[in-house]
């Protein structure tokens, strides 16, 4: 087990990745902004079709999962391994709950024959078609990030159980935490932009 | 030192701000609506970044915070210039 461990370096590396993700989603938001500017009424009408309560639930799930993630990291710093693992398990469950919720939401839309490229969807006004295209792409991409996060949390939880992560070498746990918080932040912007168009 | 209590308070603030955002969405203020809602979203993200992501707590990360600000600035320029392009076509 040789080699210097550079915890600060790995944290900076994770932040660099997060910055690239911010630009990635940022570009998609620019696309959203452009199409919304061109079809304001269509976007408003299509947004009204989305379930705000479900959207708010998504937001609360992710916010709470960020809390449990932060608790998990602090607990490990204080050498409370049990609390850290419990909090990590809670984070994992909330992440899965988010995915289930998103799946439910999409399946409702599919039930109304509004899946991507559906004839019923394509027959709607152009702005609405664009809205749904953006909705499926952006929330889909975000859900994929949540899925990756869930996998990473599982791996890190395993490492904590195996004591390969402890209060002296916390970098993997902290970095997964950073990734998870970013996924939360991205959703914090997705929610008003898609669900709350006035 | 990071305390559980601080995190819970931040969480509570985030939940309340989400509720505020929801309640504002129905009001007919026009473009001011969206700006307010986005401002709240930005503030929420700031809370997550400072407290949950430990940016407020860690020392020696000055240039990292500078980079984060730089990227945000870059994004603002991207959004701003695209807006000026689209708006005046």
Image (cartoon, coloured by chain):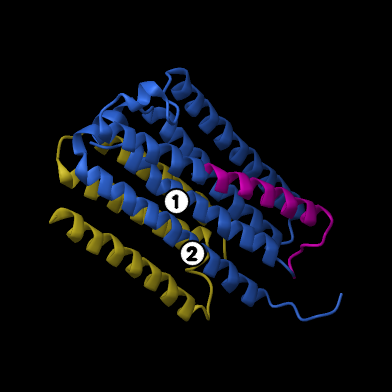
Chain colours: A blue, B yellow
SS for dot 2: helix
Residue A12, above or below A81: below
| Circles 1 and 2: CB atoms closer than 8 Å | no
- Quadrant in the picture for the C terminus of chain A: top left
Segment colored magenta: A143-168
- Let me know if residue A161 is in the magenta part: yes
Q: Nearer the viewer, residue A129 or A95?
A: A129
Indicate left or right for A77 with B1 as reference.
right
User: In x, y percent, where is residue A107?
Assistant: 51, 24
- Quadrant in the picture for the N terminus of chain A: bottom right
Prevailing secondary structure class for the magenta stretch in the rendered image: helix
**Label located before the other in sequence (1 or 2):** 2
Q: Which mark is residue A20?
A: 2
Q: Badge 2 sits on which subunit? A: A
Residue B78 falls in image quadrant: bottom left
Q: Nearer the viewer, residue B50 or A185?
A: A185
Q: Badge 1 sits on which subunit? A: A
Q: Which mark is residue A186?
A: 1
């Amino acid at each position: 087990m040789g080699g210097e461990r550079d915890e600060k370096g790995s944290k900076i590396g994770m932040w660099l990745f997060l910055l690239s993700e911010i630009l990635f989603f940022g570009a998609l938001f620019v696309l959203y902004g452009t199409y919304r500017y061109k079809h304001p009424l269509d976007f408003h009408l299509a947004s009204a079709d989305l379930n705000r309560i479900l959207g708010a639930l998504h937001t609360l799930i992710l916010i709470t999962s960020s809390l449990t993630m932060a608790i998990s990291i602090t607990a490990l710093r204080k050498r409370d391994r049990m609390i850290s693992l419990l909090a990590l398990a809670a984070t994992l469950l909330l992440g899965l709950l988010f995915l289930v919720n998103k799946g439910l939401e999409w399946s409702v839309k599919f039930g109304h024959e509004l899946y991507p490229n559906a004839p019923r969807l394509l027959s709607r006004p152009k702005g609405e078609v664009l809205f749904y295209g953006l909705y499926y792409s952006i929330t889909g991409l975000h859900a994929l990030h949540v899925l990756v996060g869930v996998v990473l949390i599982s791996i890190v939880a395993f490492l904590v159980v195996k004591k390969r992560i402890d209060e002296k070498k916390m970098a993997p746990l902290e970095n997964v935490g950073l990734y998870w918080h970013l996924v939360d932040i991205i959703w914090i912007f997705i929610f008003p932009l898609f669900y709350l168009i006035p | 030192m990071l305390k559980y209590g601080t995190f819970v308070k931040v969480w509570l603030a985030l939940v309340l701000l989400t509720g505020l955002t929801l309640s504002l969405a129905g009001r007919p203020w026009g473009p001011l609506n969206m700006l307010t809602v986005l401002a709240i979203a930005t503030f929420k993200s700031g809370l997550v970044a400072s407290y949950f992501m430990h940016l407020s707590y860690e020392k020696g990360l000055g240039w990292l915070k500078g980079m984060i600000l730089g990227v945000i600035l870059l994004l603002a320029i991207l959004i701003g210039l695209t807006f000026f392009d689209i708006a005046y076509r």
